[in-house]
Structure formats: C-alpha cells, structure tokens
Amino acid sequence: DADVTQTPRNRITKTGKRIMLECSQTKGHDRMYWYRQDPGLGLRLIYYSFDVKDINKGEISDGYSVSRQAQAKFSLSLESAIPNQTALYFCATSATSSYNEQFFGPGTRLTVL
Amino acid sequence: QKEVEQNSGPLSVPEGAIASLNCTYSDRGSQSFFWYRQYSGKSPELIMFIYSNGDKEDGRFTAQLNKASQYVSLLIRDSQPSDSATYLCAVRGAGSYQLTFGKGTKLSVIP
C-alpha cells in the first residue's frame, strides 16, 4: 500500500544534541509537511514543501530546519534540541491535484531531556 | 492571529445517538474547512472537508458551515463506539496553503 513512514518512531535525546527526523512516502505526492502536536495546543505547522526546490516556513519554524532530498523524502532537523521541543511530530503529504487531502504518517515521539 | 476554537470535551453520547461537534474560527476570509479524526496514539485522518459555498454529507457524517456566525459543525448520526476519538477541526484561510487546527474535541460513544 502507498504509505507515509517516519523514522524513528520514538527518540529520547539530551539538550543541545542535533536530531534528524525522517519522512518517506510512496504515495507519489509532491507536497510534504511537518507538524508538531502538543497536549492542549493542537497541531501546528513547522515547514512545508511543494517540490524538491520549494521550502516554506510554517507557523513555528524557529529552532528547526528541513531538507527535501527527493520527492519522496522530507527530513526535519533540530540543530540544538531544547526541552520545549518535546512533542509528537507528524509528517504529512498531499497531491497538488487534491491538496486539501493531507495524509499523515504515524508520528515520531521526541523527548528532549 | 488566526484562531480555531473547539470545546475540548469530553463529549459523551449514547450509542445510536447523534453526536454534534462544533468549532469556531476567527478568520472571516477562511475558505476551506476540515474535520480530522484522531484515535488515541494514532495519526489524524481526514474525515471530510467543505468549501465556503456549502455543506456536505458522507455516509453518517455531515459537515455544516455557518459563515455568518463563523462556526463549522460535524454531525455524526447513529454514533458507534468505534467513533470514540478526538475530532480536530482545521481551517484554511484565503490565499493560504496552511491549515490552522483547533485543539480537538474528545468524543466518547457509550455502548
């Protein structure tokens, strides 16, 4: 089945460490997104990309960077992790032709100590 | 700042009843409205979306928009225990590719 996968699924790290979260998809979608979800705050958009050469900041991009290595791969990096980046991170994809339909990956639970 | 507000719940309804979920939005120019379902520990999945020009029915689910009062609702008919989940409302503003999500309403359907 065409799918969205995220690695790792769980990660515990320490303050100041560099962390990369990876997202891959086999849906053939050109648009990819990174969100974080915090209890009581809902889902918030970090970055989004409409193709390999197009990267856009979302609502809360500070402290994060991304890389679109290929149409199917979109990575999120935390250059120097801090405790308030502890959250559940979701990657999502959509097709340009049906951009309203976003499909979410299973999520990565990140804990920064 | 664009805001989407939802009652966090929990909203409890008996099996077979109609569940009514609501959210309000602050951006009057919003054009697309989304309802996602998220089971505990799982990722959000899209139930349905509507544009500013009308309501939509899909099986047991109906999404309705009240533009004048700036709220959107999701009705779930013949509620089932499997409908127990958190329901996220999201809104896309005019000319924007970004979705603004509410914090979600937890629904519990009691057998």
Image: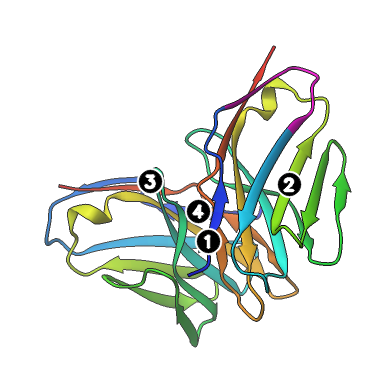
The residue indicated by pointer 4 is: A5
**Secondary structure of residue under mark 3:** loop
**Residue tagged by mark 1?**
B3
Q: In front: mark 1 or mark 4?
A: 1
**Residue B56: x percent and y percent?**
86, 52
* In this rendering, the label closer to the viewer, 3 or 1: 1
Magenta highlight on residue B12: yes
Residues at marks 4 and 2 on the same chain: no
**Image disc number at residue A78:** none
Whether residues under marks 2 and 3 lie with C-beta atoms below 8 angstroms apart, the answer is no
Left or right: residue B16 versus residue B1 is right
Three-letter residue code for mark 2: Ser
User: How many angstroms separate mark 1 from mark 2 (CA)?
Assistant: 16 Å
Q: Nearer the viewer, residue A102 or A20?
A: A102
Alpha carbons under labels 1 and 4: distance apart: 30 Å
* Residue that appears at 46% across and 82% down: A55
Of residues A11 and A59, the one drawn nearer to the viewer in this rendering? A59
Marks 3/1 in contact by CB < 8 Å: the verdict is no
The residue stretch that appears in magenta:
B11-19
Q: CA distance from mark 2 to mark 3?
A: 33 Å
